[in-house]
Image (tube, rainbow, N blue to C red):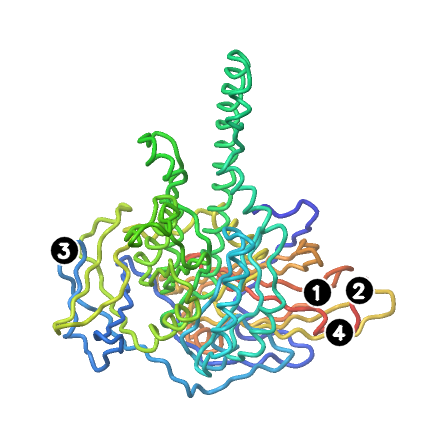
Amino acid sequence: MKRPPSTPVFYCAFSLALLVTLPATGNKLPVVGATKQGILHVTTQLVQVNVIVENKRGQPISGLNRDDFKIFDDGEPQKISVFTVEQINPKGVSVHLPQDIFSNSIERQTGDSPVVTVILLDGLNTSWANQANARRGVIRFLQQIQPSDRVALYALGTQLRVLHDFTSDSSTLVQVLARYRGRLGDELSSSLADDADNPPQWSQDVSQSMGENAAGVANSLQDWLNDTNSIVAEYYMNQRAEMTMDALSDIAQHLQGVPGRKNLVWVSGGFPLLQGLDQMMRNGDFSNGSTYAEEISRAAQALNDVNLAIYPVDARGLMADPSFDVRQKSIPNHLPVHLDDNFTTMDQFARRTGGRAFYNTNDIQGALRTVIEDSRLTYLLGYYPTHGNWTGEYRKIKVAVDRPALRLQYRDGYDAVPEVPAAPPVAQQALDAAVLSPLDATAVDCVVKPVALKTPPRQPRRVEMQYWIDPANITLAPDGDKWQVRITMAVEEVGPKGENLKGVSHQFNFHLNSVTRKNFLASGLRFNEPLDIVPRAERIRVVVRDDPSGELGSLSVPLNRVLPVMDK
């Protein structure tokens, strides 16, 4: 996304001295949490697969070890280099940040490292009536969540909205969702696409009442209407698909810093993998229609990169075959094409990320509980593929356990895409998008302590920003006998409509010797800077990027929690 032309940007460079001697005014920023080693990137890529193992009754199987598993990459056996058991610990140690300190780490915000679940209410691809039905099912689920559950509520319309981020407080989530009624813009965007999928038809009676010439004109006009509405339908469908996939990728980025398996429950009316599949099946012409396989592949890769399994839940509930009537003695064992082409998309996402798809059922509450139970005990397997063929093809994964009568659930493959740093324009677009995103990126941990400074009357208010960047996910690139660190930070003052009012960008580029490297890994990067707050600014958005890897961290500081009176 391009920065608005009215936004002034200031660049400054910082030296290594900031790692040793930091300017300080006011209270110093405390370091929260332990620091791990920095990242040394290697060329061999690790493929990680999260595996759920259950018996016939759906109960998790514990006590398995590395030797119990076998894993295959396109049929070739692989050595399991990483093996961990991930289990929910309901007795996590709470860590609550002081009110004046802000962090993008979900682990710090929730107090422990549980399995986290996002419920995404998709108003963009779901009719108003089905949204209401799905909301009731989600509320019934939220009323009985357990203390070890960490649930977030997001809503997708023309934009992604955070209704409530992660919590185990059932009453708060229910209150938030009870107040949410969808948005007219969301319903409008869906209904426009629905109308385009079902263009108006000339009445047969009217056509028959016309003369032969007039009927011919009417038929030609109908053909023109059909062509026009087909173009409109494809446009809206493409828009919806792009916004939906972008939202899924944003959620993946938000959960990147959370360890272990994560769940994304996508409550949606869905969209077909191939637009117009039902019509093409009827007339046997597959020359037209739009496929969204590429978009789905891109989103699935983003989800898999952060170990996030997607569980599509059909908001339409139980559906019957329209061809069935009361005179039939049995119910058809199939669904019509125009109903189950949406199911294809749901199944695709579930298979490619290790989740499950729930459709043709009214038990949304039960589906959500199944998602939580899936993550009570999982096994994480990691291997370095031996194929050496990173040209983008999709490679199938197979996992086996040498025990009878078990059900295994895991993602069925991955795109063998080489790891390459993003080009500068792409990296800048990702940073700009993180500034505008309603969700915090969590790949790079950062902590901010804002302190209000005294200012003379009628002068711009000032806030001292005290920053700490965790070195755990910062790349230390070997350079001779030293290590190079390159970090970009953007700090934006944001207005009430999400507009960027003023920004400053910092670029850190320095080398570490053995002594300064040790100091960096122990203390991270800290520095302070004063900001003049412009009128109408409501929050400060901080984005940090590890330049070699492109990994991001971001957070927002609401100014009403820093300054006693807001500028008007």
Q: Is residue 380 left or right of residue 93?
A: left
* Mark 3–mark 2 distance (CA, rounded to whole Å): 64 Å
Q: Is residue 352 left or right of residue 489?
A: left
Q: Splitting the image into 4 quarters, where does residue 558 fall?
A: bottom right
Residue 566 point in image, percent of width and height: 78, 67
Q: Earlier in the sequence, mark 3 or mark 4?
A: 3
Return the residue at label 1.
Answer: 531
Disc number for residue 567: 2
Q: Give the residue type that dot 4 points to.
A: Leu
In the picture shown, does residue 305 fall above or below 455? above
In the picture shown, does residue 364 fall above or below 523? above
* Mark 4–mark 1 distance (CA, rounded to whole Å): 10 Å
* Mark 3–mark 1 distance (CA, rounded to whole Å): 58 Å
Which circle, 3 or 2, is nearer the viewer? Answer: 3
Residue 555 point in image, percent of width and height: 57, 66
Disc number for residue 453: 4
Q: Earlier in the sequence, mark 3 or mark 2?
A: 3
Disc number for residue 75: 3
Which circle, 3 or 4, is nearer the viewer? Answer: 3
- Residue closest to the eye, 23 or 542: 542
In the picture shown, does residue 119 fall above or below 435? below
Q: Give the residue type that dot 1 points to.
A: Leu
Q: Give the residue type that dot 3 points to.
A: Gly
